Image: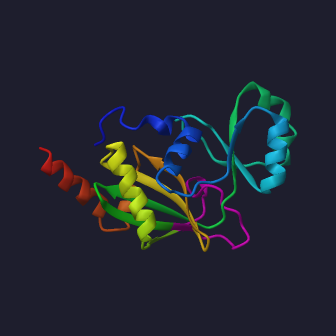
């Protein structure tokens, strides 16, 4: 769907977040480092902290715990991306050339259970179509127009404090979301492809 090499910032997660901030998205507090001293300060300032790979390679987002702290000497071997944990509900917003379809995803676990990445949580999920605030949709459309990407999957954490963007994926998987909305994403993609025949 998207032309190769369009908007490659997703290949560098910290740079990608910097780009998204230019479109007035709220992003998580982040630190890319291989310094234990810098990480210690970040942990003290932010409490719960997540870590993940900083490149385009798919990695599992994990919670930084005492187990990881005990292996701190390994950090010097490679920079790692750390982010302040953002509480709230996960929302995936698919944007097909201006048509937005947003679904919240919640895991059926007790409220005190911490879900770091719903994609790897084995418990059942609940999906629900959600409205998108005008300012968030405006940012999504502006980013899409700038990037030249016809199809984007935006990942958000949503709370009473607002919508925090985690990523704008230029090659989003969508089937698991699409079957909850009567194939609206597929139909929008098909319509767009038909126009460009």
Q: Give the range drawn in magenta.
A: 105-125
Taking the view exactly as shown, the residue that stands out farthest to the top is 77
The residue sitting at 64% across, 47% down in the picture is: 61
Quadrant holding the C terminus = top left
Using the rendered view, name the quadrant where residue 51 is placed: top right
Using the rendered view, name the quadrant where residue 38 is placed: top right
The residue sitting at 46% across, 53% down in the picture is: 23
**Above-or-below relation of 62 to 124:** above
Is residue 148 visible to us here?
Answer: yes
Closest to the observer: 116 or 163?
A: 163
Residue 31 is covered by the magenta coloring: no
Is residue 176 visible to us here?
Answer: no
Residue 95 at x, y percent in the picture: 35, 57
Residue 116 is covered by the magenta coloring: yes
Quadrant holding the N terminus = top left
**Above-or-below relation of 55 to 113:** above
Report whether 176 appears left or right of 14.
left
Magenta part, dominant SS: loop
Residue 71 at x, y percent in the picture: 84, 35
The residue sitting at 72% across, 67% down in the picture is: 113
Total numbered circles: 0
Tell me how the rendering is colored.
rainbow
């Amino acid at each position: 769907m998207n032309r190769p090499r369009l908007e490659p910032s997703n290949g560098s997660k910290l740079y990608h977040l910097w780009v998204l901030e230019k479109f007035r998205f709220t992003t998580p507090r982040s630190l890319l480092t291989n310094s234990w001293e810098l990480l210690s300060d970040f942990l003290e300032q932010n409490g719960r902290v997540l870590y993940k790979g900083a490149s385009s390679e798919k990695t599992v987002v994990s919670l930084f715990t005492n187990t990881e702290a005990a292996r701190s000497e390994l950090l010097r071997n490679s920079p790692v991306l750390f982010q302040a944990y953002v509480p709230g509900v996960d929302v995936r917003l698919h944007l097909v050339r201006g048509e937005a379809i947003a679904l919240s995803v919640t895991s059926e676990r007790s409220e005190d259970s911490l879900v770091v990445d719903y994609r790897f949580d084995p418990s059942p999920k609940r999906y629900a179509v959600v409205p998108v605030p005008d300012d968030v949709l405006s940012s999504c459309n502006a980013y899409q127009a700038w990037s030249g990407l016809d199809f984007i999957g935006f990942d958000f954490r949503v709370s009473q404090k607002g919508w925090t963007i985690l990523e704008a994926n230029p090659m989003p998987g969508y089937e698991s979301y699409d079957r909850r909305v009567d194939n609206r994403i597929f139909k929008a993609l098909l319509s767009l492809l038909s126009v460009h025949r």
